[in-house]
Amino acid sequence: MAVESRMDKIVGLCKRRGFIFQSSEIYGGSNGFWDYGPLGVELKRNVRQAWWADMITLHDELTVQPGAPSTFDMTGVETSIIMHPQVWKVSGHYDLFCDMMVDCRACKSRFRADHIQSSQCPQKPSKCPGEHDSCQLTDPREFNLMFKTTLGAMGTEADAAFLRPETAQGMFVNFKNVCDSSRVKIPFGIAQIGKSFRNEITPRNFTFRSREFEQMEMEFFCHPSHSLAWYQYWRDRRYNWYINLGISKANLILREHAKEELAHYSVGTADLEYAFPFLGPGEYGELEGVAHRGDFDLRSHSEGKLKKEGESLVVEQGADGKPKYAGSGKDLSYFDDQTRERFIPHVIEPAAGCDRATLAFLCEAYYEDEQPDEKGVMQSRVVLRLHPRLAPIKVAVFPLIKKEGMPEKAAELYRDLKQAGIAAAFDQQAAIGRRYRRMDEIGTPYCVTIDGETMTAGTVTVRDRDTLEQIRLPMNEVVGYVQGKLRG
Ligand code: GAP
């Protein structure tokens, strides 16, 4: 019998316990699309909230940074998924956001040209595309990854629009609106979390490469002469965000792109990469990119589509000598009223994937071990060691037995926890050991048991998922105890 891989076990747990399901599964599934179940939706919401808190609500930069006062503004927006089509022409996505693909005329499959060696031809026995005698591969052709739709009832080519392939452009086109409405001063950031869509040719590795996914992106606008220092700052800060939420240093790397890897506008890019279990030893997959984008985006949206000429960026001309795709013509420069200087801000962009971060947290948290049950017999256990802030349920309340007033007492505590805004569960089914294991498997960090002593002395036991340590506390201190743990 084939041994189940670590990744297969994680995917199995996600389905069995309601974290992640294949989209439209009862119809055979939809490739590259995923649904988050009752626990998954809470986990992902916690990832989103942890990001938003770190980037926006709780962002409190007390160290004086280059060109910044002791604090700086971090703002948020939520922009539309379908934007003016010119946005994608000017940004370069319309012309350049392509993968090279190869079709097989025999089996009608499509493969990414750069993934042929790691792809499988659907014919049996399994081989790489092109290795069967009957394979008929075409030459590589460009395939744009943007999903196309049409606006309005006519549905003609003139009504064509695109689902956004990144959230970033929503921030660039609103730069002036945010400056004019919010009295922000450079340096400052605009962030958003939202869905993006890419018609990936080979979606794979569970949610890692999907066709619909969520991004958490922030555009940080700063003075050009401070931009390199800010680039370093955001790279390090983003690395620490993952570490502080439980990713181990052994599994996370920060990889600077080599010069030839950089996009035409980029001065520097670093990827945060994680050792996902579906990869081979020593291999890492991208979690997030932190890019120094120079003034490329604001200048393009002002002047038109830019291209590199020598060391500088110039507006790209069409065959008729006019700008290939004109920008908005709006002035997107910034005037510093203290230094009396006008300039186009440079942008540092940490661009993370919410689904990839959620998957990395799940992979990191998955452990198997053996623990004694209440009779001292060793039982195998699956445990998700999720950071308490990410865990979908923070605390479970168990009455030891279903009588002697214990269920009522447990219900009282359960309600107090919920009213304090703490995600709690109530479970009175099966032996206590089985209840613990059910909670360990979904990453619940604390389990509280109501027993005989609760009824006489008002105390409960609190069991820690990771250390398995049990302490006794007065029941009326449980809410404060859990709140303290979540804050800490
Ligand atoms: N604005 C820059 C940008 O979009 P990107 O590297 O293409 O950069 C940023 O995307 C992040 O979005 C990636 O690091 C990854 O976490 C996530 N992402 C990109 N494509 C994805 C896909 N097909 N499925 C899931 N997540 C994806």
Image (cartoon, grey):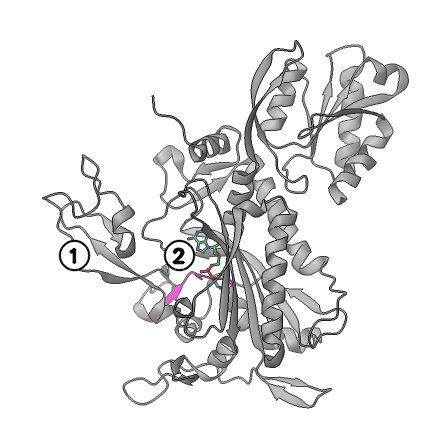
The three-letter amino acid code for the residue at tag 2 is Arg
Please, which residue is most extreme toward the right here?
457
In this rendering, the answer to whether 152 lies above or below 22 is below
Q: Position of residue 336 (x, y in %)?
A: 68, 85
Identity, as a three-letter code, of the amino acid under mark 1: Thr
- For label 1, count other residues whose C-alpha is less than 10 Å away and answer few (under 14), some (14-19) or many (20+): few
Residue 159 visible? The answer is: no
Q: Answer left or right for 295 relative to 416.
A: left
Residue shown at 68%/32% (left/top)?
A: 445
Q: Report the side of 395 relative to 173 (left or right).
A: right
Label 2: which secondary element: loop
Judge whether residue 164 is colored magenta. yes
Q: Position of residue 214 (x, y in %)?
A: 51, 53
Image quadrant in which the N terminus is located: top left
Q: Is residue 343 above or below residue 119?
A: below
Left or right: residue 151 compared with residue 60: left
From the image, tell me which residue sits under label 2: 198
| Residues in magenta, as a range | 158-167
